[in-house]
Amino acid sequence: MSAEWFRVRDSFDHSRVAPLAQARWGGDPASLRFISSAYNIVFRFERDGRGYYLRICHSVLHKLEKARQVMHFLRYLAEQGVPVGEPVPAISGEFIEVLADGFFASAQIEAPGENLSRCWQDPAIFEAWGASLGKLHTASRQYRANTSIAYQFPTAQTFWRNIAPTMAAASGELRRAYAELTAWMQGLPPHDYGLIHGDHRPGNVIWDGTTARIIDFDEPNHHWYVADIARALLELWDMPLEARQIRRKAFMRGYLRKHKIAARWIDELPFFIQHRALLMVAWTLQEGGKPGRALDWALRRVGW
């Protein structure tokens, strides 16, 4: 995220939101509650006793055309029965409402349950979580982007090339890891590759006791499907190998019921997890921050 986005985000007048929710989505202004501005600016409101989330963004963070293409993908997934945060149109019929000063907004139905990050270490949940992701990837295989929207989803290769200058200025250990993973990536086969969620971590999943509902589609990109699996499992890093494997096997049981991929990708998980960790390190360095725990993940390749 850029410093410009933080400046614009912090300049946003929250008093605009109550009349916005009422006029464009029929929301009860008295029910409006601020949720967060860690990424998008998010509010909750109610309409006819039901909860909704209003997400406000600005073109300095995401171009409007990108938001429209992502919305097209999200609507498609919802129509296919994939458990996602279901988008709802405004009174105008539009799913994205353009506001003044470069801002735009969208809304989705509130998913019941709790954030998976609060209960995600329970092995019994992993199978249902894997099934949800499997349904998403099965639907993704048939998805076609809207060609009338002037935005194309990026690829894993694009992200990887974009961090090359940052890696060239990094430590020798990081440069070696980047070179090794570049060679590995170039040797991967082209199958089991498609549009993925892009940030499929526990914090972007809602668990209602039976279903893992996937939310926050901010960075879909073309990648090997196993990359979403790797991101889901990455935060198990601190567990012993046996505990990681129990949860990975449960996750894959659910996943493979809904989406078939080649068995070789399980063997590739250590590489994909390291690949994602190194991207996280590079993005943090680009923003002037310190990578923290992700640095250890980027330099080590461990069994899963």
Image (cartoon, rainbow, N blue to C red):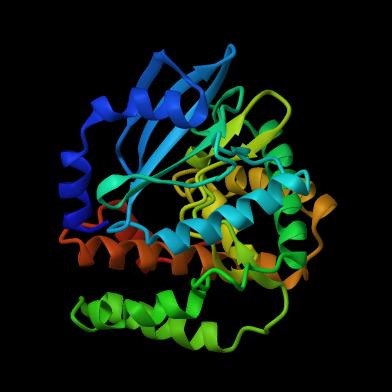
Q: Is residue 189 left or right of 156 when viewed as pictured?
A: right
When asked about the image quadrant of residue 194, the answer is bottom right
- Residue at 29% across / 68% down in the picture? 282
Q: Position of residue 284 (x, y in %)?
A: 25, 60
- Residue at 68% across / 64% down in the picture? 266
- Residue at 28% across / 29% down in the picture? 16
Q: Nearer the viewer, residue 128 or 20?
A: 20
Q: Nearer the viewer, residue 53 or 168?
A: 53
The answer to whether residue 272 shows anywhere in this view is yes
In the picture, the quarter occupied by the C terminus is: bottom right
Q: Is residue 86 left or right of 174 when viewed as pictured?
A: right
From the viewer's perspective, is residue 158 above or below residue 303? Answer: below
Q: Position of residue 169 (x, y in %)?
A: 18, 80
From the viewer's perspective, is residue 271 above or below residue 118? Answer: below
- Residue at 56% across / 58% down in the picture? 230
Q: Position of residue 92 (x, y in %)?
A: 55, 39
Q: Nearer the viewer, residue 210 or 59?
A: 59
In the picture, the quarter occupied by the N terminus is: bottom left
Q: Position of residue 195 (x, y in %)?
A: 62, 66
When asked about the image quadrant of residue 246, the answer is top right
From the viewer's perspective, is residue 93 above or below residue 263? Answer: above
Q: Residue furthest right?
A: 257
From the viewer's perspective, is residue 32 above or below residue 278? Answer: above
The answer to whether residue 121 shows anywhere in this view is no
Q: Nearer the viewer, residue 98 or 69?
A: 98
Q: Is residue 227 left or right of 169 when viewed as pictured?
A: right
**Number of dots carrying numbers:** 0
